[in-house]
Amino acid sequence: MQRKTISSLTALALVAAGLSSVSLAQQKSADKKMSFFATSAGPGKGADLGGLAGADTHCQGLAKAAGAGNRTWRAYLSTVEGGGKKAVNASDRIGKGPWYNAKGELIAKNLDDLHSDQAKLTKQTILTEKGQMVNGRGDTPNMHDILTGSDSQGRAFQVASDTTCGNWTKSSADGSANLGHSDRTGLSEHLAAKSWNHTHASRGCNPEGLRSSGGAGLFYCFAAK
């Protein structure tokens, strides 16, 4: 009886190990292909990301933790001209594509596709590096406001108002950043409310201001190469 019990336990352990191996193999395959994600968390200082360099480092760190750190990751963020520096377009920072999410699903073939109505960007496909959906409208808390500082084509704004929270260095109540909606929904049926990268301005650059309209200081990361 004891020998039979031990044999049964051994068999169950082997089955569990087999299932675990399959799961790990599937995860490894998805991670290997992943070239796009929304951050599961921000650095923790509102829209102060440490500039573009700090945001890129955050992308790289999250990608590495997910098993995809062998690629060059860039934040999908624009900056405006100032301090002797030229404006930077988010679309110029992320390579040429194609891009896949954490489940290995194609979201866009190239830059034109990414910034068109054909891009496969929905609440179900805009996933974090962990393969999880970002909370959207109707979820608690709503976190669908994604920092971009960009227009619908991923370009920096040429306006006097702040659209990048001081080029991603502000965490105060003053200032603002342009946002997109990761779930492609909003309070109105206007097209802008359904944009993943160009929806509305934030209510400040501090964590409280970002949370007040449904944000958590998240942003998009792309594998540039």
Image (tube, helix red, strand yellow):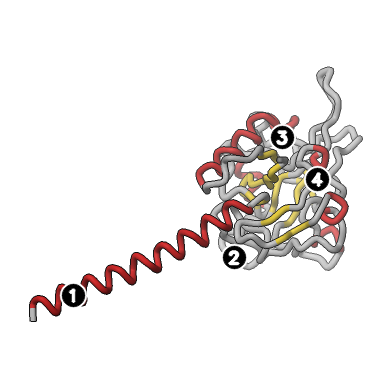
Q: CA distance from mark 3 to mark 4?
A: 35 Å
Q: Badge 1: how crowded within 10 Å, few (<14), some, or many (20+)?
A: few
- Depicted 43 relative to depicted 190: above or below: above
Q: Nearer the viewer, mark 3 or mark 2?
A: 2
Q: Which residue is mark 3?
A: 174
Return the x and y of residue 217 as percentages of the image width and height.
63, 44
Numbered disc 4: secondary structure: loop
Q: Badge 3: how crowded within 10 Å, few (<14), some, or many (20+)?
A: some
Outermost residue to the left: 1
Where the N terminus falls, by quadrant? bottom left
Query: In the image, is 225 to the left or to the right of 194?
Result: left
Q: Which residue is mark 1?
A: 7
Q: Which residue is mark 4?
A: 96
Which quarter of the figure has residue 77? top right
Return the x and y of residue 129 as percentages of the image width and height.
58, 51
In this rendering, does residue 213 appear at all? yes
Of mark 4 and mark 1, the one earlier in the sequence is: 1
Where the C terminus falls, by quadrant? top right
Is disc 1 in contact with disc 2, using a CB cutoff of under 8 Å? no
Numbered disc 2: secondary structure: loop
Numbered disc 1: secondary structure: helix
Say the numbered circle drawn on residue 139: 2
